[in-house]
Image (cartoon, rainbow, N blue to C red):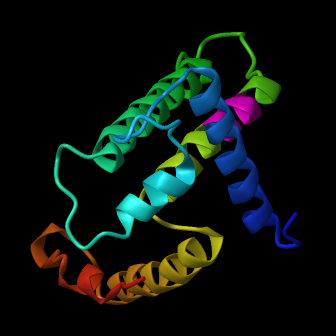
Amino acid sequence: MPNDKLEQLFAMQSELNDRIFAKKDIRDREGKTLTMATLIAEAQQPEIGPNTKVNEWLGKYLQALDDEGRELKEELLWKWWSKDRLDMQNIRVEIIDQLHFWMSLALTAGMDAETVFKIYMQKNAVNHARQDNDYSKANKSEADNKTVVM
């Protein structure tokens, strides 16, 4: 098991996904049991079209992540006059459910813990630069995102 906590989480998520693929008899294009390694390898191809397992599973994991976001939103209290209280234990579990699907998305896109860290550091610098330049709709551009590379 990796020493780095983020690497450990990614390894555990990959193992869980492989277990689910096997248990649910989910197959790859060759008819073999689908694995995260297969998805990651496909994500490394230079051109990935719409009829690929990567596209299919990015969509499935995004749908699951969206649903977990909805479940978290249902835990939040918007009635300021209510005497209800937040269920922080369940809120924390819903956030971890989101992390499960977020990591599955990252893995399916061919990112491991090191790649996520590298891209995060670059994008964080872009976001700070945007704040330094009074980021707004008027000066919004995605050109700075093109500087973020794997």
Q: Residue 116, relative to residue 93: is it above or below?
A: below
For the point 35% across and 49% down, the residue is 54
Near-viewer residue (64 or 47)? 47
**Residue 10 spot, x, y in % from top left:** 68, 57
For the point 37% across and 85% down, the residue is 149
Q: Is residue 65 shown left or right of residue 82?
A: left
**Residue 147 spot, x, y in % from top left:** 30, 89
Near-viewer residue (113 or 29)? 29
Near-viewer residue (34 or 81)? 34
Residue 95 appearing in the image = no
The N terminus appears in which quarter of the rendering?
A: bottom right
Q: Which quadrant of the figure has residue 80?
A: top right
Q: Residue 65, relative to residue 79: is it above or below?
A: below
**Residue 117 spot, x, y in % from top left:** 60, 77
Q: Residue 114, relative to residue 26: is it above or below?
A: below
Magenta stretch encompasses residue 135: no
> What is the magenta range?
91-97
Residue 65 appearing in the image = yes
For the point 36% across and 84% down, the residue is 148
Q: Residue 37, relative to residue 56: is it above or below?
A: below
For the point 65% across and 49% down, the residue is 14
Near-viewer residue (31 or 58)? 31
Q: Is residue 141 shown left or right of residue 12?
A: left
The C terminus appears in which quarter of the rendering?
A: bottom left
**Residue furthest top as drawn:** 83
Q: What secondary structure predominates along the stretch shown in magenta?
A: helix
